[in-house]
Image (cartoon, rainbow, N blue to C red):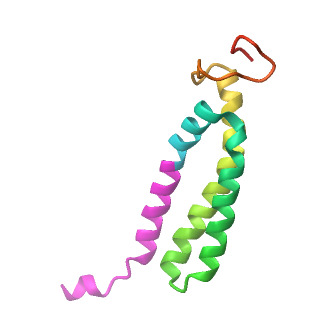
Amino acid sequence: MDLLSSFHFDGLIIGICTFLIIGIFHPIVIKAEYYWGTKCWWIFLILGIVGILLSLYVKSVFWSAILGVFAFSSLWTIKEIFEQEERVKKGWFPRNPKRKYKNSSDNTF
C-alpha cells in the first residue's frame, strides 16, 4: 500500500478525462448538426468562453486542466460542426428529413 501512495495519479486521471471529454464531443457534433445544423455553433462558443474563464478562476490544477480541456474541446466543436455539414453533404452521415437544408426546398443540398 505504501508503494501506491508514492505515485501521483493526477496526470493519468487528467489524460483519461481528456480522452473521455473528446470522446463525448464526437457524438455531440453529429447530433447537433443533425438536429440544428450549423446554427448552433454559438452555443459551443459560449461553452468554450465560460470554460476558459472558469479554468482561470479555479484554484485546483486538476479541475483547471479539466475545464481547459472542456473549453477547447467546445471551441474545436465549432469547426467540427461545419465539417460535419460537409460530411452530410457527401453522404457519409444521414440527413435529418424533418429539417430544411440550405439552397433547397426538397431537403437536398
Q: Position of residue 6 (x, y in %)?
A: 31, 87
Magenta stretch prevailing secondary structure: helix
Front-most of residues 7 and 25:
25
Q: Position of residue 20 (x, y in %)?
A: 45, 55
The answer to whether residue 73 is left or right of residue 27 is right
Q: Residue at x 48, y 49 (%)?
A: 24
Relative to residue 99, is residue 61 depicted above or below?
below
Relative to residue 86, is residue 18 depicted above or below?
below
Relative to residue 77, is residue 92 depicted above or below?
above
Q: Residue at x 63, y 59 (%)?
A: 47
- Please say whether residue 16 is one of the residues in the magenta stretch: yes
Magenta region: 1-24
The answer to whether residue 50 is left or right of residue 8 is right
Q: Position of residue 106 (x, y in %)?
A: 71, 10
User: Within the image, what quadrant is residue 59 found in?
Assistant: bottom right
Front-most of residues 109 and 36:
36
Q: Residue furthest left?
A: 1
